[in-house]
Image (cartoon, coloured by chain):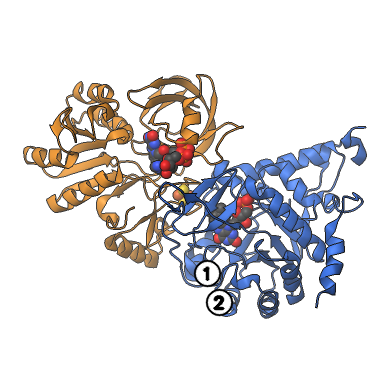
């Protein structure tokens, strides 16, 4: 029996409903661009029709402008890339006065990524931008591996995450999405902490801390010793973290890590993600996100699945494939 | 300011038209891109992406060394050295193979500047200057072409350079470190000798190893010449988005970016007072905009 028959008869692709909800946010499809890989939104507007995407997540903005790290900032590795950009961005004032007005013209669903070294800085950002009409939601970057202060290590503490989310939640009427680092002992702990603090959704995951040494010169291929690993190389890792997070919380989870095609995206959805983000693949193929939308639609249509929302979490459900998260959750709850 | 960065870059399929050895370890690659590909300027580059299964993930930046328009295509020429996994795979491509091209990218040489154009190439840095020589010839401006390398075999594309320069009334000046061809010495020594014979101001357009470009930058500053230098950096996106290809700004460029930021001009939208992005602020930079003490 063919796989397609397990789902149902093929339907015309145009009949597939790709819309998804992330809290109060309605997306026309589940494909978003990942923060830091699509600029502030307008750089690719002449090659990608932004209205075909579920939305765009802007480069993480911080209160003060950041110049970023010294070179070398990029190194290619097997199936992936390491970056140590260091959150280079124009800062809150210029984001507000220059970038947001431009984004408003693009008619895309805009999710603004915000980052801070402390709870106070994040609060300042949300106080300033929280009610901006051009921003549909906020993604809070709790997970940059390339900054000394306020990076993934600082935000690895569940109690700190929960307290911060509690403080931030009332500052904006828009959905707040917490972006998590994969480099924690158990992502279910950070995921639950954000949910408890009032996050409307999660993004799982940011880049993995990685390293590459040039043996001939006995120095790092990056200007810093470590960087964040992204691209196809991390997809299986990211998928596992996303699956764990999605089964640990009741809020929607957005998958991120190595998506480069429609089938990659659908793996994340099957694992429990409500939507996906595409990062590194955009550097290889600027129009990749729109292609992923088309490929998802085709695949769902050929398997007779009329709503992508129905496909979400289908992998974990009856598959009886040793679904660790449920058992592990009990173990986690037993812990002192 | 150098030529404005192209906002009309795009990604398209290209076909290998020809691939040949070009002396030493160098290759010349001709790629046919669709005719609506924007005509590139000398100094601009493209990102070349190999078809799957490719041994590398990211595209590889490559200067455009030639552009020939035909009825139904535009042929772009590249001069490159197979140095690693990606460029070795490129060198293995046969005519007819497919490659993806994103471009044209970056800002090229401002060849229309008033003054005497002097093109200076070091080793494979000759690639964008071959195209610059073509462009100047089309403008019917004769150019001085200074070409340097460690030894004669590294004067890659010397015949090509001679054809483009000398046949159009320009003059070729050679230098090798070991004296095996032309002057024994480097391109800056050639500039030193040449300058008194040329009408000021000199407008230098150069590409080559960073050490050479840094020496030219210092010479130009000391002699009141303009210098436009094509730089390299490791790149991912090539389009200004990833912020991965920084070069250090000079104090003067920093002030200009800060002033423009306050005035909120569109040109300053990407402005970072500390780092300029090689791919969109360059690859051709005016010498005084970079901090040569900190260029790696
Ligand atoms: C704007 C621009 C224009 C360029 N134009 C040309 C050109 O016309 N002809 C040409 O031969 N090369 C050119 N290069 C360099 C070319 O991009 C690199 O040689 C290429 O990326 C190496 O890829 P690889 O996979 O073969 O090497 P890898 O396997 O990635 O690395 C092999 C070696 O190449 C070095 N390398 C990697 N990337 C670069 C880089 N960007 N610049 C310098 N060295 C690098 C590495 O440090 C390493 O030592 C240009 C680079 C830039 C940024
Ligand atoms: C060059 C680069 C810059 C990034 N900058 C940010 C950033 O500013 N904020 C953020 O939350 N994530 C940032 N990321 C992480 C991506 O958003 C994404 O989560 C990660 O790259 C994994 O997805 P991918 O494998 O599809 O790239 C960056 C990634 C890259 C490669
Ligand atoms: S290569 Fe991405 S910003 Fe220059």
User: Splitting the image into 4 quarters, where does residue B193 fall?
Assistant: top left
Q: In the image, B52: left or right of B294?
A: right
Q: CA distance from mark 1 to mark 2?
A: 8 Å
Tell me: is circle 2 under 8 Å from ligand 2: no
Q: In the image, A171: left or right of A59?
A: right
Callout 1 secondary element: loop
Please state the horizontal and vertical placement of residue B113, each as a whole percent of the image.
Answer: 23, 42
**Labels 1 & 2 near each other (Cβ < 8 A):** yes
Where is A116 relative to A307, above or below?
Answer: below
Callout 2 secondary element: helix
Chain B on-screen colour? orange
Q: Residue at x 65, y 70 (%)?
A: A156
Q: Residue at x 22, y 36 (%)?
A: B119
The 10 Å Cα crowd at callout 1, few under 14, some 14 to 19, many 20 or more, is many
* Quarter of image, ligand 1: top left
Q: Chain of mark 1?
A: A
User: Splitting the image into 4 quarters, where does residue B25 fall?
Assistant: top left
Where is A54 relative to A287, above or below?
Answer: below
| Nearer the observer, A270 or A285 | A270
Q: In the image, A139: left or right of B125?
A: right
Residue beneath disc 1: A62
What is the quadrant of the C terminus of chain A in the image?
A: bottom right
What is the quadrant of the N terminus of chain A in the image?
A: top right
Is any atom of residue B199 visible in this view? no
Where is A13 relative to A316, above or below?
Answer: above
Q: Earlier in the sequence, mark 1 or mark 2?
A: 1
In the rendered image, residues at marks 1 and 2 fall on the same chain: yes
Chain letter tied to blue: A
Residue beneath disc 2: A121
Please state the horizontal and vertical placement of residue B69, each as a whole percent of the image.
Answer: 40, 23
Please state the horizontal and vertical placement of residue B39, each as a whole percent of the image.
Answer: 40, 32
| Nearer the observer, A185 or A42 | A185
């Amino acid at each position: 029996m063919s796989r397609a028959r397990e789902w149902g008869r093929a339907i015309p692709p145009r009949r597939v409903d790709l819309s998804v909800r992330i809290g109060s946010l309605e997306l026309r499809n589940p494909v978003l661009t990942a923060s830091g890989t699509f600029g502030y939104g307008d750089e690719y507007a002449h090659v990608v029709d932004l209205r075909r995407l579920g939305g765009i997540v802007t480069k993480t903005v911080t209160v003060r402008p950041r110049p970023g790290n010294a070179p070398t900032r990029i190194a290619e590795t097997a199936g992936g890339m390491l970056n140590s950009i260091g959150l280079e961005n124009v800062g809150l004032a210029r984001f507000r006065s220059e970038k947001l007005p431009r984004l408003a013209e693009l008619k895309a669903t805009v999710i603004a990524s915000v980052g801070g070294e402390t709870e106070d800085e994040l609060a300042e950002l949300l106080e300033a931008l929280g009610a901006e009409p051009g921003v549909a939601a906020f993604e809070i970057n709790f997970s940059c591996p390339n900054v000394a202060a306020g990076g993934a290590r600082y935000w690895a503490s569940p109690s700190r995450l929960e307290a911060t989310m509690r403080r931030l939640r009332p500052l904006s009427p828009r959905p707040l999405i917490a972006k998590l680092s994969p480099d924690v002992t158990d992502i279910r702990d950070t995921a639950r902490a954000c949910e408890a603090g009032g996050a409307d959704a999660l993004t799982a995951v940011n880049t993995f801390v990685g390293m590459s040494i040039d043996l001939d010169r006995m120095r790092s291929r990056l200007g810093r010793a470590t960087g964040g690993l992204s691209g196809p190389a991390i997809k299986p890792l990211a998928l596992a973290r996303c699956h764990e997070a999605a089964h640990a919380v009741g809020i929607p989870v957005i998958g991120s890590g190595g998506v480069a095609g429609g089938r990659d995206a659908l793996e994340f959805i099957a694992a429990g993600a409500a939507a996906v983000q595409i990062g590194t693949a955009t550097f290889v193929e600027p129009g990749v996100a729109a292609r992923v939308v088309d490929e998802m639609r085709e695949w769902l249509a050929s398997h007779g699945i009329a709503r992508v929302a129905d496909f979400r979490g289908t992998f974990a459900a009856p598959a009886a494939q040793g679904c660790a998260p449920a058992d592990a959750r009990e173990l986690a709850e037993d812990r002192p | 300011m150098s030529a404005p960065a192209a906002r009309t870059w795009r990604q398209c399929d290209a076909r290998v038209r020809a691939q040949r050895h070009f002396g030493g370890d160098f290759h010349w690659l001709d790629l046919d891109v669709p005719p609506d590909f924007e005509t590139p300027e000398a100094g601009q580059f493209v990102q070349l992406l190999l078809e799957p299964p490719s041994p590398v993930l990211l595209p590889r930046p490559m200067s455009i060394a030639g552009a020939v328009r035909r009825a139904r295509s535009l042929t772009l020429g590249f001069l490159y050295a197979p140095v690693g996994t990606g460029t070795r795979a490129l060198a293995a491509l046969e005519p007819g193979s497919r490659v993806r091209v994103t471009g044209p990218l970056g800002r090229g040489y401002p060849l229309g500047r008033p003054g005497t154009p002097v093109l200076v190439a070091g080793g494979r840095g000759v690639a964008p200057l071959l195209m610059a020589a073509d462009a100047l010839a089309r403008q019917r401006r004769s150019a001085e072409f200074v070409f340097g390398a460690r030894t004669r075999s590294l004067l890659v594309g010397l015949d090509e350079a001679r054809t483009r320069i000398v046949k159009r009334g320009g003059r070729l000046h050679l230098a090798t470190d070991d004296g095996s061809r032309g002057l024994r010495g480097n391109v800056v020594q050639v500039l030193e000798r040449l300058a008194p014979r040329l009408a000021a101001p000199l407008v230098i357009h150069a590409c080559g190893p960073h050490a050479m470009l840094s020496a030219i930058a210092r010479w130009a500053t000391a002699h009141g010449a303009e210098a436009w230098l094509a730089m390299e950096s490791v790149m991912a996106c090539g389009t200004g988005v990833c912020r991965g290809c920084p070069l250090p700004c000079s104090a003067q460029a920093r002030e200009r970016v800060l002033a423009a930021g306050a005035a909120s001009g569109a040109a300053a939208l990407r402005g970072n007072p500390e780092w300029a992005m090689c791919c969109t602020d360059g690859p051709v930079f005016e010498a005084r905009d970079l901090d040569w003490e900190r260029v790696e």
